Image: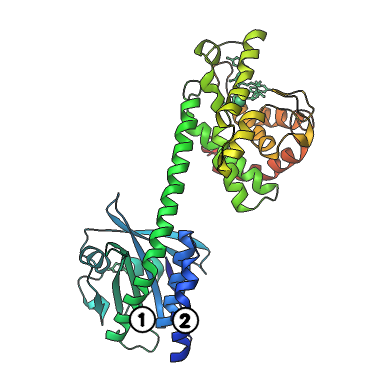
Amino acid sequence: MQYFQTSNKLTAEQKLKLLVEFGTRTSGEIRLDKLLDIIAQQISTMLDVGRCTIYLKDVEKNELWSKIAQGKGLEHTEIRVPLNGNNAVSIVARTGEVLNFPNAYEDPRFSMDVDMVTDFRTHTMLAVPLKNNSGKVLGVFQVANKADGSTFDKNDEGILTLLATLAGSSIEIAKLYQDVHVAQLETIYRLAVTAEYRDQQDTRAHLKNISIISYLLARALGMGTKDSELIKNASPLHDIGKVALADNILLKPGKLTPDEFEIMKSHTIYGGRILEGAHSKVLKIAHKMSLYHHEKWNGKGYPNGLKGENIPLEARIVTVADVFDALTSPRVYKPAFPLEKALQIMEEGSGTQFDPKCINAFLDALPEVKLVLKKYQ
Ligand code: C2E
Ligand code: SIN
Ligand code: SIN
Ligand code: FE
């Protein structure tokens, strides 16, 4: 995370206060992005520097990464530096030593790449290792350009090292949370692939489409980012119950007989059973989605014939995403329909198959849906 400072002079007393508060401000935050943002801001203020950048190690890719705020901190761009490179931050990450350049551009170990991207000119630079409690290097804290124009001294080195020590365990905990979260999403996704790969020609695109459309629908319905993210992450599991269906039904190239369709319908019941009693928020939502995604607004759906708002909203949302994707994709039993025809079917289903509010939200979100779905690019 990188933070740019507009200079404000602090008294020694104010700095001490910030230092004391630093621990409490950072210890409660488990969202890694937020945490890094707070830390970078505090460091910029306390050391009164033009820029603070926090790099974290990506062991898998053998790189250091940081997010930099572009244009008033709205957009975050990721920058990556090879860990085995010969530039300042890589050296600090590898060796664990402190590097202090009074004139960065005159030192061959300083790379100007990040300056170029951010339209910033580094004059003085200080980089210290970020370590966890057991001394393992997690990343690098880098600051540049003291507001008063002086070079970084031993005192600054001491403060930045102290801040890195104070922040180390919070950052490590936030990273662990993030790893667990990523592992959970990956598991959900792989589980969803298992259920879909037999009957979908392009499982990956199908699951992605369902996720994206569900997310945009939730947003268009006015749901917050967090709830919308949960819906997005749960939606790939809506057809998990298909794992229980035999190939002769799931893969039948032509039309299903009424008996076969009865069996096909049971994928909702199986999905419900598979996810029954789940504890996590995301799997609880996935449970409702898998059980109720073929219910219809008019009560003529399956498995329970629920009507209107008795159908959980999460399920009403994924229904719209699912059917739209089914209509616009090839299936073993049908070709992909052109967008116009798909939209016509969706609109005709408003108030019968679909919740009218969800269809309105879908139409509102349509420009964005088209923008992000690969097949419309
Ligand atoms: P799916 O192919 O993913 O389709 C999901 C839902 O999209 C369908 O749920 C239906 O509501 C909608 N849909 C798909 N194709 C069309 C279409 O051509 N016109 C309209 N108006 N809506 C469409 P539904 O009908 O409950 O079917 C559930 C699943 O059963 C389907 O998932 C598919 O796997 C299977 N299925 C349905 N009909 C047939 C069929 O005739 N042959 C085969 N082999 N499978 C079928
Ligand atoms: C380096 O420290 O040399 C690479 C990152 C930067 O240019 O700030
Ligand atoms: C899908 O495969 O996209 C959904 C099929 C279904 O809802 O049964
Ligand atoms: Fe389904």
Q: Which residue is mark 1?
A: 145
Name the quadrant containing residue 94.
bottom left
Residue visible at 70% across and 37% down in the picture: 312
| 74 and 115: which is toward the camera | 74
Q: Quadrant of ligand 3?
A: top right
Q: Residues within 10 Å of mark 2 (few under 14, many from 20)?
A: some
Q: Residues within 10 Å of mark 1 (few under 14, many from 20)?
A: many
Q: Is mark 2 within 8 Å of ligand 2?
A: no
Residue visible at 46% across and 90% down in the picture: 13
Quarter of the N terminus within the rendering: bottom left
Which of labels 2 and 1 is toward the front? 2
Instruction: Tally the marks.
Output: 2
Q: Is residue 363 visible?
A: yes
- Where is residue 130 drawn, in percent x and y? 32, 67
Does 62 appear above or below 160? above
| Label 1: element kind | strand
Q: What is the CA distance from the residue labelled 2 to the residue labelled 1? A: 20 Å
Mark 2: amino acid: Leu
Mark 1: amino acid: Asn
- Where is residue 198 drawn, in percent x and y? 47, 21
Q: Which residue is mark 2?
A: 18
| Label 2: element kind | helix
| 320 and 264: which is toward the camera | 264
Name the quadrant containing residue 102.
bottom left
